[in-house]
Image: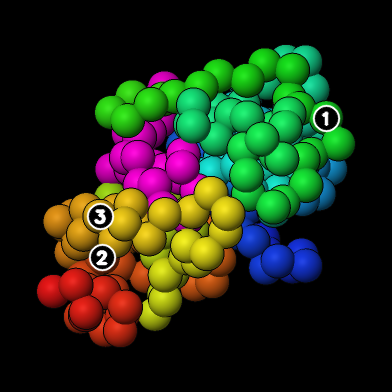
Amino acid sequence: MYLEAFADNPYATNCWLLALEGREEAVVIDPGFEAERVRRLLSAAGKRPVAAVATHGHHDHVGAAAELCGAEIPFFIHKDDELALVDPGAWGSGFPAPASPPADVRAFSEGDVLEVAGFSLEVIHTPGHTPGSSCFRTGSLLFSGDLVFKGAIGRFDFPNSSAEDMFASLRRFLALPDDLDVRPGHGQATTVGEERATNPFLLQLA
């Protein structure tokens, strides 16, 4: 499997690039910055983007989506965060909107399975950080967005955040298998088991 990320941007947001061995099709998770860099990295690996998905609607996770996707590549986001692409004031995050929304936006919901680049990404709706925050599970990988980081959790103090939803989502995270390889929206990779055992914010929920 091809799995690469870069995060040298003002928010240290991970943009994940994912492709199966032997296939050129790739999916981009959280295209917040540098669409051309995404293309260069994929091209150097013999890959090309065929889909982009967002764990949530904050600008640092979707800001480069329109440039990356153009008119050809679909962009997937939870239905409760779709408004962030066109009217963040109404959505209520306090973040700016992208310069323009992607041309082909496809909204998903809890339990959907996104069939992209040969992967089946299971949508796990984990609201709290934003109303539509979601994790994506495929095989032994979990892309956790801004729900859980290595040793920390996402903020839930934005205007449209919910502490109640956040803690319910964290308990849902704790119900996942320990050996899941967690790739977060910020920071280093970890596992569900490591966070269960060491994350001070999750220890309070045990």
**Residue 60 at x, y percent in the picture:** 69, 53
In this rendering, would 69 be left or right of 93?
right
Please name which of the two marks, 3 or 2, marks the residue nearer to the observer.
Answer: 3
Please name which of the two marks, 2 or 1, marks the residue nearer to the observer.
Answer: 1
Residue occupied by mark 3 = 168
| Residue shown at the point (67%, 68%) measured from the top left | 12
Q: Is residue 185 above or below residue 47?
A: below
In this rendering, would 11 be left or right of 142?
right
| Residue shown at the point (66%, 35%) measured from the top left | 90
Amino acid residing under circle 1 = Ser
Q: Is residue 191 above or below residue 111?
A: below
| Residue shown at the point (57%, 59%) measured from the top left | 158
The residues bearing labels 3 and 2 have C-alpha atoms spaced at a distance of: 16 Å
- The numbered mark, 1 or 3, whose residue comes first in the sequence reads 1
Residue occupied by mark 1 = 100
* Crowd around label 2: few <14 · some 14–19 · many ≥20 (10 Å): many
Q: Can the viewer see residue 187 in this picture?
A: yes
* Crowd around label 1: few <14 · some 14–19 · many ≥20 (10 Å): few
In this rendering, would 93 be left or right of 95?
left
- The numbered mark, 3 or 2, whose residue comes first in the sequence reads 3
Give the magenta range: 115-139
In the rendered image, residue 131 lying in the magenta stretch gets the answer yes
Amino acid residing under circle 3 = Ala
